[in-house]
Amino acid sequence: MARPLAGPQGLLRTLNGRAILETLARRGPLTRTELMTETGLSRTAVTQVLRMLESAAAVAPAGVDRETRGPAAGRVSLHPQLGVAAAVHVDVHAAHVVLVDPTGAVRAENHAPFPIRGDRVDHIAGLVDACRRAVGATVQLAVVGIPGIVTADGGIRDDQGPDGGAFKNALSTRLGCPVRVENDVNLAALAELTSGTGADLDSFALLLLDEGLGAGIVIDGRLHRGFSGVAGEVMYLPQTPVPIGAPVLGDDVVRDLALAHGRDPELTIDQHLDAASDGDRGALAMATEMGRRLTLIAGTIALVLDPQAFILSGSAAHPAMVEATARAAEDLAPRLPLSILASSFGPEAPLVGAVGEAAAALRATVFSRLLPGSERSRR
């Protein structure tokens, strides 16, 4: 495991301070000896830096290590009052809010459907406020995952057209902190890249099926958003016999397939896939057709980007859907081999990605405030 950036005694203390803060964020409470081992710093350097961090209320005592042989040693951890970040996943029906501290630990959680009439900014802010009151901490920033195209400046383009950053600015004003808006499928891809199925892959395409279909593209270990944020908008890729401009997969497509196979069009994708797992013939036919369409999307991407694997997420990670897609990919294999994998997080992948990005952004913000010279020294 790579050690955080650190230097022996005599280098800028801010570098050593960042090394210790990052280690505590990653590992949790540690003794001075453990910090020496993790960072490579001398005992004197660790003691001096901890004294500086304690005076800045950045670290705090965290009990005593009674498991290691020898005299009991005190542990230190990041100070519990360094603040929290909000991770938010928004879909067309509801908002899910999680507050995380700099270690990435979840401190509070709230979920509620959008009211029939009401402003979604007020609804999200209300959920964040309720979480904040529960933990008694300051929200330093928010990362919000939404369906739709997100531009470089945080603007949203959806079926209603571009919003010019209105949602981002309104939420930032309401929360009183910076807000970063991300496409939800991209956040799902970041979750898989950081700690999921894609962690050991250099490149992959995540295919997330929910109300619609989107892709998150990772190339050489980095998320590819595209020049204007439209990378991964695969739902309208041409595909026979689907008419040009019609969606390949999504709620509307599933309703049409249900009618064609004698099933209730009001059931959700997951309900049809549950029925397929139970052996329902109409549902199995639906899953087969959805798997075929998803495989052709994967094949189209493969011919352009040639990723190591395709990770199925959202409803596409349902076992019936994974099986149907794998069968279709096997039929295509003599001409175009495709590796099909299931998401580690399923429908929760966008929120998991938002949590990870919020925790990382919070650490960067907190550490820069505590060690103002550290960003300059890292350049």
Image (tube, rainbow, N blue to C red):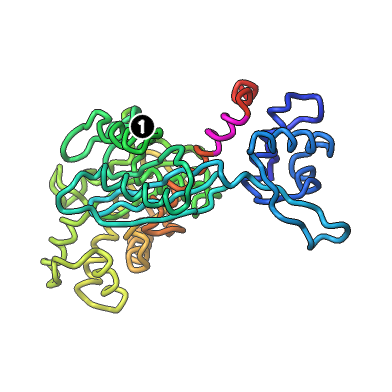
Q: Position of residue 358 (x, y in %)?
A: 46, 42
Q: Position of residue 199 (x, y in %)?
A: 53, 49
Q: Position of residue 290 (x, y in %)?
A: 25, 60
Residue at x 55%, y 35% (from the top left corner): 366
In the image, is 301 to the left or to the right of 162? right
Residue at x 84%, y 39% (from the top left corner): 43
Q: Nearer the viewer, residue 114 or 324?
A: 114
Q: Amino acid at mark 1?
A: Gly
Magenta range is 363-370
Q: Position of residue 244 (x, y in %)?
A: 14, 43
Residue 364 is inside the magenta segment: yes
Q: Nearer the viewer, residue 257 or 41?
A: 41
The residue beneath circle 1 is 226
The quarter holding residue 287 reads: bottom left
Q: Nearer the viewer, residue 281 or 302?
A: 281
The quarter holding residue 86 reads: top left
Residue at x 35%, y 44% (from the top left corner): 145
Q: In the displayed orientation, state which residue is furthest to the right.
A: 70
Residue at x 31%, y 34% (from the top left corner): 168
Q: Looking at the image, can residue 137 be seen?
A: yes
**Prevailing secondary structure class for the magenta stretch in the rendered image:** helix
- Quadrant placement of the C terminus: top right
Q: Looking at the image, can residue 298 be seen?
A: no
